[in-house]
Image: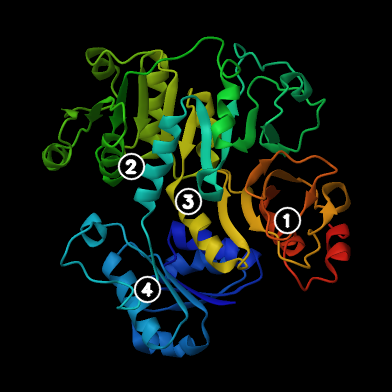
Amino acid sequence: MKIVVVGAGKVGFDISKVLSEEQHDVIVIDKDPDALNSVVETLDVMTMVGNGASAGVLEEIGIKTVDIIIAVTEIDELNMIACMTAKQCRVPMTVARVRNPEYTSPHPYLLSYARFGLDLIINPEHLAAQEIFRLVEVPMATDMEYFADGRLSMVGIKVEDNMAISGKSIRELSLDKLTVVAISREGKILIPSGNTLLLPKDKVFVVGETAGFHNLNGLIKSHASKFNRIVIAGGGLITQYLVRLLRNRKNRPEIKIIEKSQEKCENLAGESEGCNLVCADATKMEIFTEENLGPGDIFIALTGSDNSNLVASMLAHKRGVEEIICQISREDYIPLTEMSGVTATITPRLLTVSTVLKLVRTSNVLSISMLNSGDAEFIELKAEPGSPAAKKPLRDLNMPSKTIVGAIIQDNKVIVPRGDTMIHPGDRVLVFSLHTKASMVEKLFRIGNSNIAGDINAL
C-alpha cells in the first residue's frame, strides 16, 4: 500500500516505523525539517517538508495514487482538513487523530465526519482511558484486552513471590480452560511449554473465555485484595474520559483526583461531579499522607509527565498501594516502572499504532493488540476457506517461531487448542506473535499463499 503520514512527531514516527517494517510505501509530511531529519536517518520512508493539509503539497506527492492518509499532528483541525482534502482526491481511507472532546462528544449540531471525508477518528486519550478502565475491572492485571466481541480475554499477570503460581510449572496449574501463551522474562519473550516454571518478576499472558477467568482466583494473590477508592494523579483528558467510564460502573467507587494546576482544577470542577478534587502536587509524599493513600486504593498516575508519573508511583508504592497504573510515553522507561512497584503501564501512542495496524492488515484480521514493549502482539484472525491453516491440525501448521495459538472460536464454542486441534474455515483464531512474524502468521489464515511453507521455514 501507498500510505501518507502527516506529522513526524512521536506518534507519526511510530506509525511510519511499523508501516515501513511491513513493506508499505510510506511518505511522511511535516512542516518542521528537523522533525523529518530523525525520520530520514532512522526509517526507510520518503519525506516531504510542507503543510499536510495543503492541496498543493498533497498533489505534489501524488495523492491520487495513495491508499491511506493518516494525519496525526498535534493540531486536530489540521488533521481533519488534511483528511477532507485527501478525500476530495478520492483517497479510499482517511484517518485523523482528534483529541479535543468538543469535536467528538455527542451533540445534535456536531458535524457528520464521514460526510466530510473522515473515515476514522482516533482519540489516543480515549483509547488510554478505555484500557485503564479494563485494568481497573481486573485488579492486579498488568494487561487486559478483549477479543471476539468480548467472548475471549487476554490477561497479563506479574508473578510475585507471594503468589500461589510462583515457582510452579504451567502443567501444575491445571488451567484446562485457559492457555498461557507467553512469558516476558528479563525483557525477552518466551513461548512456554507445560514444563516451564513461572518465576518471580515474570510477566505471564493468559488467554481464555472471558467467563472462565474466575479460574484464576486464588492464583494471583495469596490473599484477596479489596479496593474501595481510586486515586488519580493528573486532571488531563485521559482522566476526564476515565471518570466518565467509571461513573457507569455498577459498584461506583469513590474517586479522588489530585491535580496541581489551579486552572485545571477549576475546569475539572464542572466535569467531575461526584469526585473529590484536591489541588496539590502528587509528587509530594505529604499529600499522600494527608489523603491517607494506602493498600485499599487503586492509584493511577496520569500527570502528563513520565518523570512525575514515576515519582508519584514510587510514593504510592511506598505507602503500600498494591494496584498502581502508570502512563508512560517512552517504552525504555517501562523497566523503571516495574522497579517502582507499578502494576500496569499505559502507552497511548502504541494504542494508536494498534488501531492503524488493523486498517492496513488483510481483511481477515479482526483485531490487533500490541504489548507495551511494541515487539509482540495478539492478532485475532478469521480462517479463510482454502487457506493453509484450514482443515489442518495445529502441529502441522509450521507456525513461525515465537508464535502460538491461544484460543479458537469454532461453532460458537471457545476451544483451548492442543496439537491435534483442527482449524475449520470461518473459525476465529487468537494468535500471539512477535511483531516481526505477524505478516507470516496472517498468510497462514488467508488464501493465495502457495509459498507460505517455504517463507516460514526461512525464518
Identify the residue shown where x is 31% and y is 44%: 238
Question: Quadrant of residue 73 in the image?
Answer: bottom left
Pick whichever of labels 2 and 1 is earlier in the sequence. 2
Q: Nearer the viewer, mark 1 or mark 4?
A: 1
Q: Nearer the viewer, mark 2 or mark 1?
A: 1
Is residue 108 shown above or below 242? below
Local SS, label 4 = loop
Please state which amino acid type lies under the numbered disc 1: Lys
The tag on residue 243 is: none
Question: Quadrant of residue 103 in the image?
Answer: bottom left
Local SS, label 1 = helix
Q: What is the crowding at mark 2: few (fewer than 14 residues within 10 Å), some, or many (at least 20)? A: some
Q: Is residue 114 left or right of residue 287?
A: right
Q: Which residue is mark 3?
A: 351
Local SS, label 2 = loop
Q: Which residue is mark 4?
A: 31
Point out the image quarter for the C terminus. bottom right
Question: Quadrant of residue 364 in the image?
Answer: bottom right
The Cα atoms of the two marked residues, 2 and 1, are separated by 33 Å
Residue 422 is situated, as x and y percent measured from the top left of the image, at 80, 50
Q: Which residue is mark 1?
A: 437
Local SS, label 3 = helix
Point out the image quarter for the N terminus. bottom right
Residue 369 is situated, as x and y percent measured from the top left of the image, at 56, 49
Q: Which residue is mark 2?
A: 304
